[in-house]
Image: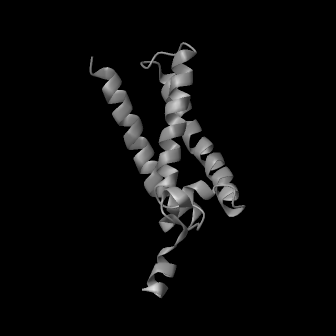
């Protein structure tokens, strides 16, 4: 009964640790904030886990864990690259509109205007 909940909590913890480390690996990028890598990691892991479960892998099988643990950073890196290029090209203007333009400002710009 509690096994699926424990699995999801473990994946969320792994994605959280990964999201905390990503800014130090890739460096600062003005095209995405600090929450985007974590959101992409969690989203990618959920889609991958669902696809592998749908393909017939059990959550007690070690392969599903191994594939998810290795593919999550790779998939997140690809998604972050696509997101960063799209945001730099102005194709993702809805992100700034949803955030009220706050996500377009960096911390340095906010300090200068203050």
| Residue 69 is at least partly visible in this image | no
Q: Quadrant of the C terminus?
A: bottom left
Q: Quadrant of the N terminus?
A: top left
Residue at (52% x, 52% y) in the render? 37
Where is residue 44? Give x, y as percent.
55, 38
| Residue 45 is at least partly visible in this image | yes
Q: Is residue 79 left or right of residue 56?
A: right
Q: Residue reaching furthest left?
A: 2
Where is residue 94? Give x, y as percent.
58, 55
Residue at (68% x, 51% y) in the render? 82
Residue at (47% x, 85% y) in the render? 113
Where is residue 96? Give x, y as percent.
55, 61
Q: Which quadrant holds residue 56?
A: top right
Q: Is residue 57 above or below residue 79?
A: above
Colour mapping = one colour
Q: Nearer the viewer, residue 89 or 59?
A: 89
Residue at (55% x, 30% y) in the render? 48
Q: Residue reaching furthest top?
A: 56
Q: Is residue 49 above or below residue 95?
A: above
């Amino acid at each position: 009964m509690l096994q699926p909940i424990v699995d999801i909590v473990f994946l969320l913890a792994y994605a959280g640790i990964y999201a905390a480390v990503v800014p130090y690996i890739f460096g600062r990028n003005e095209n995405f904030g600090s929450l985007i890598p974590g959101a992409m990691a969690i989203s990618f892991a959920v889609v991958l886990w669902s696809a592998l479960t749908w393909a017939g892998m059990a959550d007690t099988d070690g392969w599903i864990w191994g594939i998810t643990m290795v593919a999550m950073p790779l998939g997140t890196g690809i998604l972050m690259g696509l997101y960063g290029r799209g945001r730099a090209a102005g194709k993702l203007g809805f992100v700034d509109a949803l955030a009220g333009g706050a996500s377009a400002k960096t911390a340095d710009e906010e300090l200068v205007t203050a």
